[in-house]
């Protein structure tokens, strides 16, 4: 019971910290979105070619979340950190975004087919090797939610994603949908 409570407290604290960061970033995102409308400069990250590709999967033909919402594109992680280490696989992709963007927005979601899983996924977003955003404890009861990350001055954008489970049959995948870069 103690471990379960500690895990719950850790998850709540991480989500609260994420909300504070996102709230602080919202003004920047709104300004970026406004600038994008006038400049046409926002871009779906998955339309850019990563210069390093690991085992993260790009979903380019649409994906559905647990509430039935559909997204045109998404990035999906399916391997656990232990499996990745054991099989010597990199669960991340890296893009050179050339310091051209100020914010990254995305929807954190769980795939419809992962409903009922007892497993959890996670992801990390890095800018030039510095951790910018992290989320753990993404489970089948996680409802979709938006994130906004300050990527001002970033050249190398790395997104690391992990899932967990049994060969995808009873597991869960961490998913970032509609990843958009704003100038």
Image (cartoon, grey):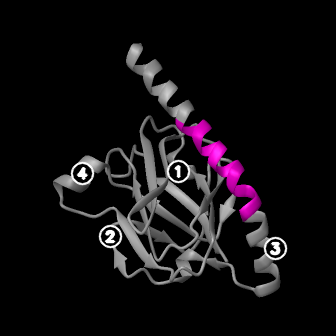
Position above or below: 14 against 38: above
Determine the image quadrant of residue 159: bottom left
Residue 14: x and y, percent? 53, 38
Residue 45: x and y, percent? 56, 75
Predominant secondary structure, magenta span: helix
For residue 108, side relative to residue 117 (left or right): right
The reply to whether dot 2 and dot 3 touch (C-beta < 8 Å) is: no
Please tell me which of labels 2 and 1 falls first in the chain. 2
Q: Which residue is mark 3?
A: 34
How far apart are the alpha carbons under marks 2 and 3? 33 Å
Describe the element under mark 1 as helix, strand or loop: helix
Position above or below: 80 against 34: above
Please tell me which of labels 4 and 1 falls first in the chain. 4
Disc number lying in front (2 or 3): 3
Disc sitting over residue 113 in the figure: 1
In the current view of this chain or complex, which residue is farthest to the front? 153
Q: Is 23 part of what is drawn in magenta?
A: yes
């Amino acid at each position: 019971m103690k471990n379960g409570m500690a895990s719950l407290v850790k998850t709540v604290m991480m989500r609260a910290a994420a909300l504070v960061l996102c709230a602080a970033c919202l003004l920047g995102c709104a300004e970026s979105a406004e600038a994008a409308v006038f400049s046409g400069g926002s871009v779906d990250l998955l339309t850019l070619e990563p210069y390093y590709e690991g085992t993260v999967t790009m979903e380019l033909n649409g994906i559905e979340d647990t509430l039935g919402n559909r997204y045109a594109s998404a990035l999906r992680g399916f391997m656990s950190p232990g499996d990745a280490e054991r099989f010597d696989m990199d669960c991340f992709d890296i893009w050179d975004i050339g310091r051209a963007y100020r914010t990254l927005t995305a929807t954190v979601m769980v795939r419809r087919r992962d409903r009922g899983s007892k497993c959890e996924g996670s992801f990390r977003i890095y800018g030039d090797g510095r951790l910018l955003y992290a989320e753990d404890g993404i489970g089948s009861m996680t409802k979709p939610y938006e994130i906004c990350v300050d990527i001002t001055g970033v050249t190398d954008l790395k997104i690391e994603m992990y899932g967990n489970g049994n060969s995808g049959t009873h597991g869960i995948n961490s998913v970032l949908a509609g990843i958009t870069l704003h100038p």
